[in-house]
Image (cartoon, grey):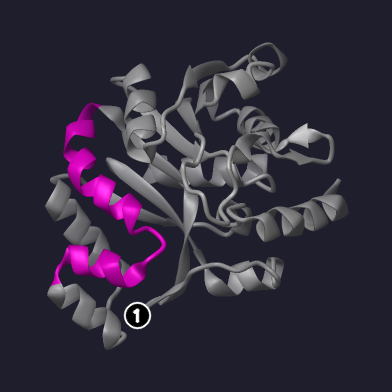
């Protein structure tokens, strides 16, 4: 069993990005409820902490037997305060905007992550799987030597090594949807290899592990729901269409 932190913070952007995504309604339930349901049914976690807007999410505590912690506008700070709550434990981090997530997807990621025996595991999904399942969804893909991939919304980490993640992790989160800037952070050599189509997943794992003094591992997931997040109003409408077919 792992401890779980769900990131459900309010977005401070004033553009076309959704605010308070966690409480958006889909099929009569808040978006975050589908995530909580999948996590609990996976039987991989025995404790769930939601870092979000307590005023809007207060009803979740009794309905789902979870703990609520007030968020702030910093994604990194929300992650760190969530991890601190479970200091010394292996922690699963999930966003609240993946309503199509299933118990099978959660279990698959956690089992693979634990088998990898790594300090930090990050979910990735191939472009083919994403498009085959959700052809209308718009995602950011990066072309690597191994194929084309998008980042997922599940992480598994060792909370005893948080101090090693914080500084570099903050920058990586900032550039998570901008592959070019991410590779610049790793170094010019990596940016060049990306341009030439020679950058492999293993190259990134080795570099990140070296920079953070940890063992990092990318977990290839066969469940596109992990990567199909809701970020903009059009994403929400698309999620409602897909969810209508499922429910």
Q: Is residue 198 visible?
A: no
Around disc 1, counting alpha carbons within 10 Å, would you say few (fewer than 14), some (14 to 19), or many (20 or more)? Answer: some
- From what the image shows, is residue 150 above or below residue 70? below
**What quarter of the picture does the C terminus occupy?**
top right
Res 207 → quadrant? bottom left
Q: Which residues, given as a range, are shown in magenta?
A: 160-187
Q: Which residue is mark 1?
A: 145
Position in image of residue 202 (x %, y %): 27, 66
For the point 51% across and 36% down, the residue is: 10
Question: Is disc 1 placed on a helix, strand or loop?
Answer: loop
Position in image of residue 121 (x %, y %): 36, 47
Position in image of residue 220 (x %, y %): 46, 59
In this orientation, which residue lies closer to the viewer: 23 or 38?
23
Q: Is residue 69 magenta?
A: no
In this orientation, which residue lies closer to the viewer: 24 or 243?
24
243 to the left or right of 35: right
- From what the image shows, is residue 138 above or below residue 52? below
Res 167 → quadrant? top left
For the point 39% across and 76% down, the residue is: 146
């Amino acid at each position: 069993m792992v401890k779980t932190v769900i990131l459900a913070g309010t977005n401070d952007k004033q553009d076309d990005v959704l605010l308070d995504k966690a409480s958006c309604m889909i099929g009569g339930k808040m978006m975050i409820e589908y995530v909580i349901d999948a996590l609990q049914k996976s039987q991989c976690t025995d404790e769930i902490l939601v870092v979000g807007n307590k005023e809007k999410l207060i009803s979740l505590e009794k309905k789902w037997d979870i703990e609520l912690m007030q968020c702030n506008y910093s994604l990194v700070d929300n992650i760190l305060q969530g991890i601190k709550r479970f200091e010394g434990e292996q922690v699963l981090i999930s966003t609240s905007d993946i309503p199509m997530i299933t118990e099978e997807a959660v279990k698959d990621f956690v089992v693979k992550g634990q088998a990898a025996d790594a300090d930090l595991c990050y979910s990735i999904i191939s472009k083919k799987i994403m498009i085959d399942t959700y052809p209308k969804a718009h995602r950011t893909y990066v072309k690597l030597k191994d194929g084309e991939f998008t980042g997922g919304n599940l992480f598994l980490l060792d909370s005893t090594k948080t101090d090693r993640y914080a500084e570099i992790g903050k920058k990586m989160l900032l550039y998570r949807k901008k592959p070019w800037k991410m590779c610049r952070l790793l170094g010019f050599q990596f940016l060049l290899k990306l341009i030439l189509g020679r950058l492999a997943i293993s190259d990134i794992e080795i570099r990140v592990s070296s920079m953070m003094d940890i063992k990092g591992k990318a977990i290839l997931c066969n469940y596109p729901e992990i990567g199909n997040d809701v970020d903009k109003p059009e994403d929400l409408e698309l999620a409602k269409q897909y969810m209508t077919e499922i429910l």
